[in-house]
Image (cartoon, rainbow, N blue to C red):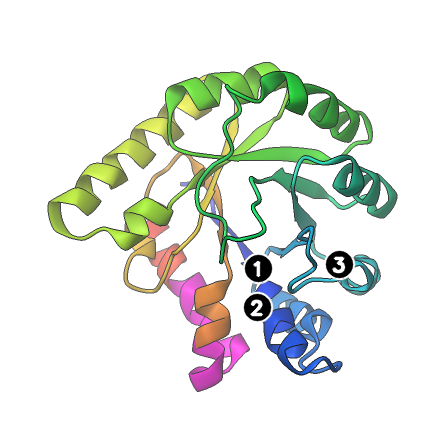
Amino acid sequence: MTRLRLGVNIDHVATVRNARGGAFPDPVRAAILAEQSGADGITAHLREDRRHISDDDIVRLTAAIKIPLNLEMAATPEMLAIALKANPHAACIVPEKREERTTEGGIDVVGQFSRLQPIVGQLVAAGIRVSMFIEPDRKQLDASRALGAPVVELHTGAYANAVGAAQEKLLKHIHNAAEFGADIGLEIHAGHGLTYDNVQAVAGIPHIRELNIGHFLVGEAIFAGLAESIQKMRTLMDEARA
């Protein structure tokens, strides 16, 4: 089975830094440590309100890391201009609301197709790998493919928050969506809310190529250190694939 890649989201290292308004802890240092600890990529979400990652962080990340940078971004002219200038390896298009604590669900590619199409087209033309952060739904997968985005990231938040039979049902939706998406030629990623306790069921889905995990790893780093947290997650993912 294909090795599953791990993208580490370093947003909440910046959240802690910004709580005091200083320079520490430095999310770029976290990204370098993640790279050394087995991460295959770094994810950073540059939000409209700059609540965690800053413009300067993106510049420094681009210069500092050797593994791919995945820029999470809203579909706005401002973020498009920043992405085209920074030229990250990848850009993941996510929905964004100022009042939300974290990304609350997938972007509605079907309903926003006309608005998204020129943005995705410019990113693709610039050689940036575009992914759409969507719910595990066939209509959203079909629309993402029609947009020209080569990748989708399936939102796993509902699965991560559910228990028992409800969680099993949601896992089946993710599995079916991953299989369908792969069948129509998309590369399938997944993420949101994944922890040591729930990651293996998702990691075991053979059609998924990459998981993006951040908040949990940064939280665990308080107790065990970032390197150990990433290495443990890497081991659990590898065990699920074995």
Using the image, tell me which numbered label, if any, was put on residue 240: none
The local crowd at label 2, few if under 14, some if 14 to 19, many if 20 or more residues have their Cα within 10 Å, is: many
- Identify the mark nearer the N-term, 3 or 2: 2
Using the image, tell me which numbered label, if any, was put on residue 12: 2
Using the image, tell me which numbered label, if any, was put on residue 66: 3
Q: Which residue is mark 1?
A: 9
> Is there CB contact under 8 Å for labels 2 and 1?
yes
The structure residue drawn at horizontal position 33% and vertical position 65%, both measured from the top left corner, is 196
The quadrant of the rendering that contains the N terminus is top left
The local crowd at label 3, few if under 14, some if 14 to 19, many if 20 or more residues have their Cα within 10 Å, is: few
- 195 relative to 188, above or below: below
Q: Secondary structure at mark 2?
A: helix
Q: Secondary structure at mark 3?
A: loop
Residue type (three-letter) at the residue carrying disc 2: His
Residue type (three-letter) at the residue carrying disc 3: Lys
- 31 relative to 198, above or below: below
- 83 relative to 38, above or below: above
